[in-house]
């Protein structure tokens, strides 16, 4: 207790310094006064008695200092003094202080912002039980590998693998439909959701917060009338009503019973049936879950459609490689036993890789780029600190000569750098918050972006990173300056500081590192920017300007058709109702003022491959694997005119084709694939058991993906009217005017139709390249930052060199040296580190370019234009930065320099 009381007393004295000093002064005066009175009583005079009292007391100042040491904490006292001194010094060197603080804030802030995105999207585990054991398996068909290496799953194959694989603890199957939902008498709206097998949530290790999970018997036709909601959907649709269980929600026009609400923390990322397939839901997470009911033929036919995705949980201790080997073996042996005409295999992927496969490399590239910027930030800090320590050598020597020890001198430097790091870290927190918001707006389409947020630990990491960086690159120059002998430093002139040669060598190495990082980042940025420019400026063979797209959902019971493709092929009641709705809607949209043309299709343009099928020629049968594959699109009269896709041969669809034998239009690539030896016009293809005559050849429009012009065959929509028709309207009006008019026109035909998407086609095109745009924007920002930091470093070393050689320049000018020789002398010291930095940057850029080759579109990893322009930009900007130091070098007054000597 006594020790604790002593510690508390000493710490408390730091906050009562003035009162304690006042009490000490009073006590000393009283002691001397009593002693003086005692000597006077002995017969001394007053002056003599006071002198004797002071002599016996000792040095007053020394006694007071010893008492202060005993009552307080010496280390903290000296620390407070050093903090005050550091603040005064930083305030005197305001330019240096602001430069360090801003450099730190930008460097650590940008790293934190990018890392927050990388952590949420790629590193942070999913909130599932033992998330590392969750995998996804897909199937692959050898005959289709050249078009689609990976495919969704076949339902019967899923059952076979689930029942026979010993490496799998359990497996669930799912689809990702978009549901039309409503709770009141209002226009239905769309919600993203999943149709899942009853064991889906148990595979994930998640249970409902309210209610129960699905039961096995509910995955049957007629008994699948239950839904489970996410926490957010419960709050939005039912306002968090605790009595929500048992209430109804109209899903696709059918009343469904709410049986459960998932936990607030539950997030299931957006998945695609086809790898690379785009999703068009308006939310980032799923809201409605329904039991999955397979089609009857999917339970009996081994080579039925591949329409599902499987999420499985591995048994403990089983690796992905082991599961892959076992599942693939079962799949191949079953296919051989069933004499399937195709060669199937299984590919097992970690769940996280399935979700982030397409964006992981761009994100890691962004993190690598920002780490390069942080490295350049550290190099600039080191340059600044080296220059500052060199300038302060005389001050350090003077303090050392006056009695300051090395520990106390080092402590002062530590305190100064800690203050810089703390202030820079606080600024970095602000930059991180702003940077995170900018990244979220630029990369809104990336998976799990709704989970990106800066938390207290990450902000604390920002602060510690800034302080650690400031300390690391401030202490080393300070330690070197402590080795300088005080006498030699005090005898040196102000412009000739000891250790200049070592200082310049260190700064040249740092500049070489800066230039190398800058060259590497600029080249990678140039490659990505050139790739993005190629992507956006290529000939798409369609015109997205002045086109507005509206996607609708016809999920009401009156629009439903028998599952699959019926024998009567589109003549059932549901198909007729959909065709009538489409016809009436097209008429209503044509009546909108200012509309130039309207059209219908089944897929929003530039949203990925949706329905691929074989191009079978009845007159030329081919073996499995040799039949060409093309994407199937439904359209009607006016589609090619509205999209401005050229018809190269033949004609467009017409209304008269409804009464004629079935017709089709092929894209040029599809026509060449199916009819490589002749004209496709007038010939036939077989699809869904029906014979179609080719009446037109259209240009290869990139309506699936801007990066690929895949083969496409177009069928008239009235043959099998789509359940999610997409209406396209070309008009000079903007979406602000045309969008509401299109909604009202569609609802005037049927007010129960939900319209999940109304978007300008230009916006859809931009959304389809969101990842590529994110890469280009983020790398351009980091490339610009790297260029600025490199220029600052080059300017700094030139300015420092000119300052240190001022006297030499003056003497050379006095002796008749020309300005050209002076410039060459000044630049001679920087040319070697810049040249070495360029070579080092080229090597690093070569390694990075090979790594990012898959991200480039029609751009070589060794693109000479990108490499040449990057180096040229750096050299030009660096030359501009060198103008001011060069001007100072050639304008030195020789008389002033000689007088100073």
Image (tube, helix red, strand yellow):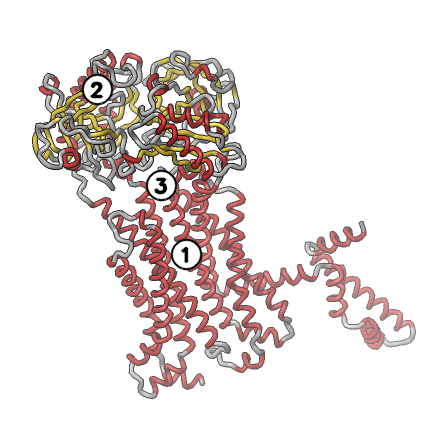
Displayed quadrant of residue 791: bottom left
Displayed quadrant of residue 329: top left
Label 2 near label 3: C-beta < 8 Å?
no
Q: Which residue corresponds to mark 3? A: 358
528 vs 789, left or right, is left
Residue at the image point whose x is 35% and y is 79% from the top: 892
Label 1 near label 2: C-beta < 8 Å?
no
Q: Secondary structure at mark 3?
A: loop
Q: Could you tell me residue 822's position as x and y percent? A: 32, 79
Instruction: Please identify the quadrant where the C terminus is shown.
Output: bottom left
Q: Secondary structure at mark 2?
A: loop
Q: Using the numbered discs, state the Cα–Cα distance from disc 2 to disc 1 in whole angstroms.
A: 55 Å
Q: Using the numbered discs, state the Cα–Cα distance from disc 3 to disc 2 in whole angstroms.
A: 33 Å
Q: Could you tell me residue 423's position as x and y percent? A: 51, 55
- Confirm whether residue 644 shows in the render: no
Residue at the image point whose x is 29% and y is 48% from the top: 856
Q: Residues within 10 Å of mark 1 (few under 14, many from 20)?
A: many
In the image, which disc is placed on residue 372? 1
Among the two numbered marks 3 and 1 on one chain, the one whose residue lies closer to the N terminus: 3
Q: Which residue corresponds to mark 2? A: 720
- Foreground of the two, 25 or 211: 211
Q: Residues within 10 Å of mark 2 (few under 14, many from 20)?
A: many
Nearest-to-viewer mark from 2 and 1: 2
- Foreground of the two, 542 or 757: 542
């Amino acid at each position: 207790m006594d020790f604790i009381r002593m510690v508390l007393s000493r710490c408390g004295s730091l906050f009562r310094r003035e009162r304690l000093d006042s009490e000490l002064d009073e006590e000393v005066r009283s002691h001397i006064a009593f002693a003086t009175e005692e000597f006077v009583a002995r017969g001394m005079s007053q002056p003599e008695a006071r002198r004797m009292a002071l002599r016996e007391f000792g040095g007053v100042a020394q006694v007071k200092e010893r008492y202060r040491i005993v009552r307080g904490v010496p280390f903290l006292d000296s620390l407070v003094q050093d903090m005050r001194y550091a603040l005064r010094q930083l305030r005197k060197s305001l330019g240096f202080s602001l430069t360090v603080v801003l450099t730190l804030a930008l460097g650590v802030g940008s790293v934190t912002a990018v890392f927050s995105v990388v952590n949420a999207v790629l590193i942070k585990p999913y909130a599932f039980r033992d998330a590392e054991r969750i995998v996804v398996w897909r199937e692959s068909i050898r005959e289709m590998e050249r078009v689609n290496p990976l495919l969704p799953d076949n339902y019967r194959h899923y059952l076979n693998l689930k029942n026979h694989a010993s490496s799998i603890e359990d497996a669930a199957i799912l689809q990702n439909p978009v549901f039309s939902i409503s709770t009141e008498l209002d226009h239905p709206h769309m919600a993203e959701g999943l149709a899942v097998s009853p064991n889906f949530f148990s595979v994930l290790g998640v249970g409902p917060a309210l209610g129960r999970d699905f039961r096995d018997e509910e995955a049957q036709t007629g008994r699948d009338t239950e839904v489970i909601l996410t926490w957010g959907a419960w709050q939005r649709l039912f306002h968090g009503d605790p009595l929500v269980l048992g209430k109804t929600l109209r899903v696709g026009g059918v009343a469904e019973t709410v049986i459960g609400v998932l936990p607030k923390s539950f997030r299931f990322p957006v998945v695609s049936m086809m790898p690379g397939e785009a999703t068009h839901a308006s939310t980032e997470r799923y809201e409605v879950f329904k039991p999955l009911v397979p089609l009857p033929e999917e339970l009996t036919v081994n080579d039925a459609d591949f329409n599902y995705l499987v999420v499985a949980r591995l048994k403990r201790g089983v690796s992905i490689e082991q599961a892959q080997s076992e599942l693939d073996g079962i799949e191949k042996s079953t296919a051989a036993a069933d004499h399937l005409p195709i060669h199937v295999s299984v590919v097992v992927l970690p769940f996280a890789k399935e979700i982030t496969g397409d964006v992981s490399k761009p994100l890691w590239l962004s993190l690598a780029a920002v780490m390069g910027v942080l490295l350049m930030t550290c190099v600039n800090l080191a340059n600044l600190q080296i220059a500052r320590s060199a300038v302060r050598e005389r001050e350090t020597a003077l303090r050392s000569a006056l009695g300051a020890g090395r520990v106390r001198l080092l402590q002062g430097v530590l305190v100064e750098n800690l203050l810089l790091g703390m202030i820079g870290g606080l600024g970095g927190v602000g930059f991180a918050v702003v940077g995170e918001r900018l990244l979220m707006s630029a990369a809104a389409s990336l998976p799990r972006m709704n989970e990106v947020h800066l938390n207290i630990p990450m902000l604390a990491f920002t602060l510690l990173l800034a302080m650690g960086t400031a300390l690391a690159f401030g202490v080393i120059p300070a330690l070197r300056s402590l080795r300088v002998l005080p006498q030699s430093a005090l005898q040196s002139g102000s412009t000739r500081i000891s250790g200049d040669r070592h200082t310049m060598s260190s700064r040249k190495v740092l500049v070489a590192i800066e230039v190398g990082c800058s060259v590497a980042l600029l080249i990678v940025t140039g490659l990505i920017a050139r790739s993005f420019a190629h992507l956006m400026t290529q000939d798409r063979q369609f015109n997205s300007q002045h086109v507005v797209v509206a996607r609708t959902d016809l999920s009401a019971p009156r629009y439903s058709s028998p599952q699959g493709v019926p024998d009567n092929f589109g003549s059932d009641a549901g198909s007729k109702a959909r065709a009538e709705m489409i016809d009436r809607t097209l008429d209503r949209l044509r009546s909108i003022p200012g509309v130039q043309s309207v059209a219908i299709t089944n897929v929003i343009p530039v949203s990925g491959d949706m329905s691929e099928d074989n191009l079978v020629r009845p007159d030329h049968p081919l073996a499995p694997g040799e039949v060409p594959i093309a994407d199937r699109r439904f359209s009607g009269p006016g589609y090619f005119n509205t999209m401005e896709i050229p018809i190269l041969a033949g004609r467009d669809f017409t209304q008269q084709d409804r009464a004629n034998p079935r017709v089709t239009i092929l894209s040029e690539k599809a026509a060449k694939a199916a009819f490589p030896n002749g004209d496709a016009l007038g010939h036939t293809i077989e699809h869904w058991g029906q014979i179609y005559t080719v009446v037109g050849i259209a240009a290869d429009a990139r309506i699936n993906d801007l990066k690929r012009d895949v083969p496409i065959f177009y069928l008239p929509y009235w043959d099998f009217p789509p359940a999610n028709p997409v209406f396209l309207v070309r008009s000079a009006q903007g979406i602000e005017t045309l969008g509401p008019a299109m909604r009202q026109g569609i609802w005037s035909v049927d007010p129960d139709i939900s319209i999940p998407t109304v978007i300008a086609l230009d916006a859809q095109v931009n959304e389809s390249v969101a990842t590529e745009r994110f890469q280009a924007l983020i790398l351009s920002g980091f490339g610009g930052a790297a260029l600025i930091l490199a220029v600052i470093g080059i300017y700094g070393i030139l300015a420092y060199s000119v300052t240190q050689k001022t006297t030499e320049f003056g003497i050379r000018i006095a002796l008749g040296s020309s300005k050209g020789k002076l410039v060459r002398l000044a630049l001679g010291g920087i040319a070697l580190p810049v040249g070495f930095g360029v070579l080092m940057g080229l090597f690093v850029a070569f390694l990075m370019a090979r790594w990012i080759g898959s991200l480039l579109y029609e751009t070589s990893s060794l693109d000479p234009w990108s490499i040449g322009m990057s180096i040229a930009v750096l050299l030009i900007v660096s030359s501009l930065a060198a103008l001011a130091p060069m001007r100072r070098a050639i304008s030195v007054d020789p008389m002033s320099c000689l007088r100073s000597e």
